[in-house]
Amino acid sequence: MVTRWIVLCVYLILMVGIGVYYKRKTASVSDFVLGGRALGPWFTAFAYGTSYFSAVIFVGYAGKFGWAYGVASTWIGIGNAVIGSLLAWLILGKRTRAMTKHIDAKTMPEFFEKRFNSKTLKTVSALIIFIFLIPYTASVYNGLSRLFEKSFHIDYEWCIVAMAIFTAVYVIMGGYKATALNDFIQGIIMLIGIVAVVVAVLNVNGGFSGSLEAMGVIPDANGNTEVYNSLMGPDPVNLVGVIILTSLGTWGLPQMVQKFYAIKDDKAVVTGTVVSTVFAVVVAGGCYFLGGFGRLFMDANEAGAPVEGFDAIVPSMMDSLSSGLFALIIVLVLSASMSTLSSLVLTSSSTLTIDLIKPLKKNMSDKEEVRTMRIFIAVFLLISVSIAVYSLRGSKQDTMVISSLMGISWGALAGAFLAPFMYGLFWKGVTKAAVMASFICGVGITVVHMLIYTFGIISDAPTKLGELNLASPVNAGAFTMLLGLVVVPVVSLITKQNDEDKALTEEMFKCYQA
């Protein structure tokens, strides 16, 4: 326990120290939000990867989907690396950097406003971001509290509050530059930590081959064996839904896409693509591979679910580790989570300030903007902490598990933004009506699904369509993303741009000719 406390305190002091250092170097809005658009490839790649993977992945998703799909859950990590990192950088990286710099867009709502010549799209998208980043932030706190309660025997409410305060301190002081340097340090810890944990956990059951053999003995719901150690697992249909949500979703998440805004040049994009992909293979692949062996560390109840809940699986696996390695795991999960939290709160506060507050207050100076962002960081954290505490109390634990909170958030955000953002970078013919239609579909479907299945307003709603789980917020989120890819081109073809919009679009696309 002493070792754990020492490691934790040293880590937190380092993070706050970086925030203090960069406070003196953060003067303008561009510095605070994008690091002056001057970050190199390694910093940007690590910022992308550490924002992608947090306690949500390591504790929530790895535990739940590892339990559901066994070793086949590793496919989720592979999908995250190939689709969520490699293809995202290859397809979006250069064009996002070029266009956002050309039109001087610092946030995703600002991109929608200037790309489609619509203040309405800017306002609506800003509200969507602020509202639906909150459940994602709450899910990160949820994952952190599970592990800290297990390792330090501290009540989860105090864990959540403490992490919120530390995150607020270094983000409020240092902005994006402090976040990026912290992300780089945190990323190195994550790479080392996940490899060490996978090896240590597998050794508990006789190494890789012994663990696979032990997984093969466990029967599925139908009594079949050799299922949880198979290549595709017991439920490949719903596994695809998880891969789509967690991989394709990054293409439409503002806190992820904005990393491309800040990168220095096209050469940095190439290097960042390689670094980010390798990072995702190790971290995401390692997390889901580890979670695939969760059934060896926790028994199932009569309903086939883990006796202590899905979010307790990975923390229970950690009980088998040595004190020193457990301390490394604490820092690993804390690193992953604080980097994600910092990205979320910075995205939310900058969106509110630049896209909602500044238009209402004329002649707002850079200093006032930065101060307002810092205030909204505190407000955002306060709201998300409240939701996290609420979701962990009593009966709420059954419906508000980590995967549900993240599914709701990613489904709404990526369902609303992915298609119009991507098509907007490549196709001149996207219309305002198509963008708004995507916003309505993404948010509308997510909210309706949440009301029906998460809060149960229709008690006899169908939960299955063949093998497909209709009640899963993950599958609902995957559906909204794919639907947007169809809605935007269809609506664009049946609606028209006016002459002013056409002229502005032609001007914007000149950035790709340079």
Image: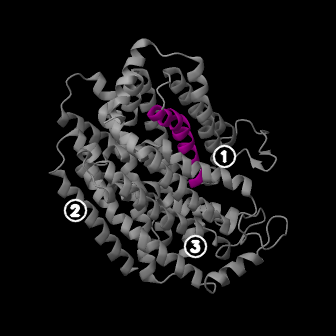
Q: Measured from the top left, where is residue 173 in percent x and y?
A: 23, 50
Residue 431 in the image: above or below residue 401? above
Helix or strand or loop: what does disc 2 sit on? helix
Q: Residue at x 45, y 13 (%)?
A: 498
Can residue 275 be seen here? The reply is yes
Of labels 3 and 1, the one closer to you: 1
Q: Give the left or right position of residue 420, taking residue 263 as reference.
A: right
Q: Secondary structure at mark 1?
A: helix
- Residue 271 is situated, as x and y percent measured from the top left of the image, at 36, 58
Nearest to the observer: residue 109 or residue 277:
277
Does dot 3 land on a helix, a strand or a loop? helix
Crowd class of label 1 (few under 14; some 14 to 19; many from 20; radius 10 Å): many
Residue 17 numbered tag: 2
Identify residue type, mark 1: Asn
> As drawn, is 452 to the left or to the right of 388?
right
Of the residues shown, which amino acid type is indicated by label 2?
A: Gly
